[in-house]
Amino acid sequence: MMRTTPFLLFDGNCGEAMTFYHACLDGDLTLTRLGDTPMKDTFPPEKHDRIINAHLKSGTFELSATDWLASPTLEPVLGNMTAIMVSGDDEAELRAAFDKLRDGNNNQWLQELREMPFGLYGQFFDKYGVQWIFRGKATD
């Protein structure tokens, strides 16, 4: 079964913001820094303290976030700093939804759905300008 979660993109202050939200909403907060992942070698050292994945869960409330890592290819501006994250455990179900929503050639910033160090991942802006992020569990 797929789930959707609000997804926020920050420009270097994701950890601070998510810690604030955690203090306000309680629950469990997980913060993963880029420098703590195998992906760190593909980014300059000044980005290693950025959050690559933040997740807050409090009861039925969930919020995910990251620090912006796409610069200078894509700059953060109001309007592209929110997304809908679709997550699930069934790779086939995620791939089917991903392929339908991306709608052929009508997408910006396409990152094909593929296995990453933290699980299945892909993203794009659809033909309406909505950003979609897909995430599946890591394979063992």
Image (spheres, rainbow, N blue to C red):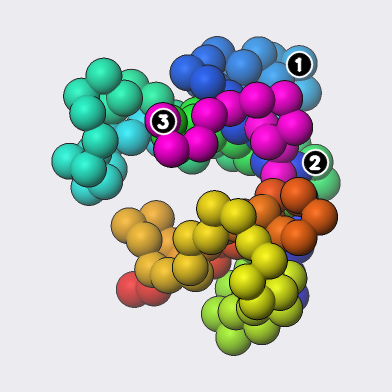
Q: Which mark is residue 100?
A: none
* Dot 2 alpha-carbon crowd within 10 angstroms: few under 14, some 14 to 19, many 20 or more: few
Question: Residue at left 66%, top 32%?
Answer: 81
Where in the figure is residue 40, as x and y percent of width and height?
23, 38
The amino acid pointed to by label 2 is Phe
Quadrant of the rendering where the N terminus is positioned: bottom right
Question: Residue at left 54%, top 53%?
Answer: 109
Where in the figure is residue 136, as x and y percent of width and height?
54, 66
Q: CA distance from mark 1 to mark 3?
A: 33 Å
Q: Which residue is mark 1?
A: 24
Quadrant of the rendering where the C terminus is positioned: bottom left
Sequence-wise first label, 1 or 2: 1
Q: Which residue is mark 3?
A: 72
Q: Quadrant of residue 91?
A: bottom right
Question: Residue at left 22%, top 43%?
Answer: 42
Residue 61 in sight: yes
